[in-house]
Amino acid sequence: MVFQLRTKSPDEWKAVTSAISTLVDEATFEATVDGVSFRGMDPSHVALIDIFWPNSAFDRYECDKLIKFGVRIDEFSKLIKRAEKKDSIEIDITDDSMLQMKIFNGYKKEYKMRLIESISSSTPLPKLTFNSKIILSTTAFDRILSDVQVLSEYVTIETRPKNIRFLGKGDSGEADILLDSESEGLEELICNEESKSTYSIDYLLKIIKAVGGSGGAISAEYSSKMPLRLEFKVANIGRIHFYLAPRVQD
Amino acid sequence: MSEKPNVISSINKYQEIKKRLESKFNEQLRKRMFIIQKKVVDGSSPPSVFVGQEGYPKVRVGPMIPAQHGNTAIMDLPEKWKGLSLEEIANYRFSLIRGISTIKIENVTGKYIETLQEMVMSKRAIESEMQFDDLIIENQKNFHGGLNMEHSPFGPSAYIKSFTIANPSIDKRIENMFYEKDIISTDAIMNLYKNNIEISRISKVFSLGMLGKNKNRKLVPTRWSISAIDDIISKNLLRIISSLPSVDTICAFKYNHLANYYSIILLPSDRWEFEMIESWHDQDKTKNNNNPFNSHLNYVIVSDYENEKKIVHSPKIAGAFFAARLAITEYFSKMKRKAAVLIFREIHPDYLMPLGVWQIREGIRAALKENKKEFENFKDASMYALEDMLVPKESWIKTSKIYDLFKNQTRITEFLG
């Protein structure tokens, strides 16, 4: 078995682990010749994360066949956090089910961590077509959701060709936030068909706070009463997709 | 609306038990009063103590002693009451005569309190004797008076002149915490809990100001002490539970005893969400109705909810909330799992007197030991949970915060195409 991953900095690993940690405690990564991927849902199956990290993004990537490795996310990210921004990180899997992490800095740090049993079943992706797409800066997205959260646990996103509204309704009142092409933070608005759908703010804010810091803008795509897909642009990582199932009224 | 057959038999049973209970209560009361008038009661205390809340911070504290000898432990050990009828439990409780003496809550030393403390450390029922003052007697006029939801009922009370006990055989586990005066009460409580001391005993020990840092020790009214113990232990268990994985499937449990019907739904969730909804029949509205089970309009329904931010106000369902939370967190720490929890409790009119929150704690503990049923979706689980309830399903569902949170939330798996 040949398996070795090396990155120039811990940032990508940090983004990946903190994204995953918003949904699950244990994660099974899958590595192939092409790259490393993760896919998993939270226990209530409301959200799904789909990550693909291509081999080209690594400083060194050696993997000759499919390898699955399971980690406890909090333990794994504790080790990652011991690396500073400019440290390179190397990860190997040893034959005795241990993950070996080397952090290169002024001196060489080496950790070994026991792997956990990996999950064999794979999570399929929902089949979706998106009628609306918006791209918002992380800061704007975070702020808008926090604005709505003051009054409501859910946000209704209403996209029209010229503008987009974020609505919230709680026991004590209502929130209404309107953005158009002039608004700060709104980088793109595409509306093929008017779309209106409601999502849990808690899930959205958790993932945005976890990953947002590593990237610039977030793209959000959805259709009426269908799941929302967030795409985080993180340098070097091919894909971080976050799917969130909508709330519907009877 | 047609009546369910089991409802009709419940009504007959209800009237019958009510009559029997009342006459038994009056008969017991006469007997006890006769004993009290002799100004002395000697018997084996289970051991049992009671701290009233009236007059706080000057409270009325004392032992409870039945006029009988031998192994009376059962009379004050709710953990052993599973399977007993309401009448049997009430009879145990009515036999306990309560001695009282007014003491400031800070006074946790002195011969009287120390004797009580020694008594509750006893491993088994203990021979005791109390002599009464000049016949200042208090009693419940009928069994609806002087009762509340948290603690169990008891017989008449009288002011104590003197009180003595035989030499007790002390439970070391409790004694160790009693003499451990440098740790906070939470740690002492958790120590007793982990050492398998029954919840009812921990709350007795706590009510006599026997736990925690020396300077903080004080008497705690029994009623508050019971809920404080349920609250403290379950909060501590929750800290460990929060890092456990969630259950994988929606499941439900049911149990009923003492005219209380419990249904519990566990939902996969990473967050702590806990809701308990209770319904009971409104006494005022049922007064003019011969059949208290019949009308759909005669019930009250209330809910209490908390998430990771623990409940801050007093729950509307009072100590029941904490007793239920204790049973649930205990289950999760044993199963090494967590979940969002929705509990339904329907109290039927033949629950003729509140017996104390132990019956909620034990009811839910028992439910979680019964058959677990798994479900594909929340709707089916709710149908199952509510099928035996007299109060209509829609009313429960309309009241539930968790139902709203989960029911309207779709799942990714519904969109796999």
Image (cartoon, coloured by chain):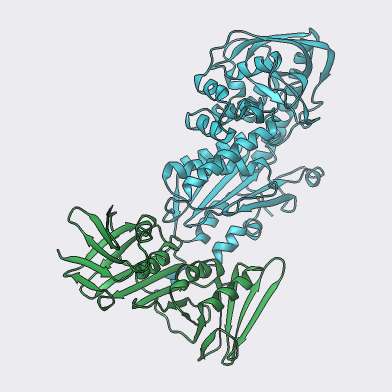
Q: At 34% across and 69% down in the image, what residue appears?
A: A86
Q: In the picture, residue B81 is in which quadrant?
A: top right
- Asked if residue A129 is positioned above or below residue A86 in the image, the reply reads below
Quadrant in the picture for the N terminus of chain B: bottom right
- Asked if residue A89 is positioned above or below residue B229 in the image, the reply reads below
Quadrant in the picture for the C terminus of chain B: bottom left
- Asked if residue A29 is positioned above or below residue A182 in the image, the reply reads above
- Using residue B335 as the reference point, say whether residue A178 is left or right of it: right
Say which colour chain A has: green
Residue B72 in sight:
yes
The image shows residue B85 at horizontal and vertical percentages of 61, 29
Q: In the picture, residue A156 is in which quadrant?
A: bottom right
Say which colour chain B has: cyan
The single residue placed furthest to the left in the displayed view is A1
Q: At 57% across and 14% down in the image, what residue appears?
A: B71
The image shows residue B35 at horizontal and vertical percentages of 76, 10
- Of residues B383 and B355, the one nearer the viewer is B355
The image shows residue B137 at horizontal and vertical percentages of 82, 18
- Using residue B214 as the reference point, say whether residue B22 is left or right of it: right
The image shows residue A69 at horizontal and vertical percentages of 26, 61
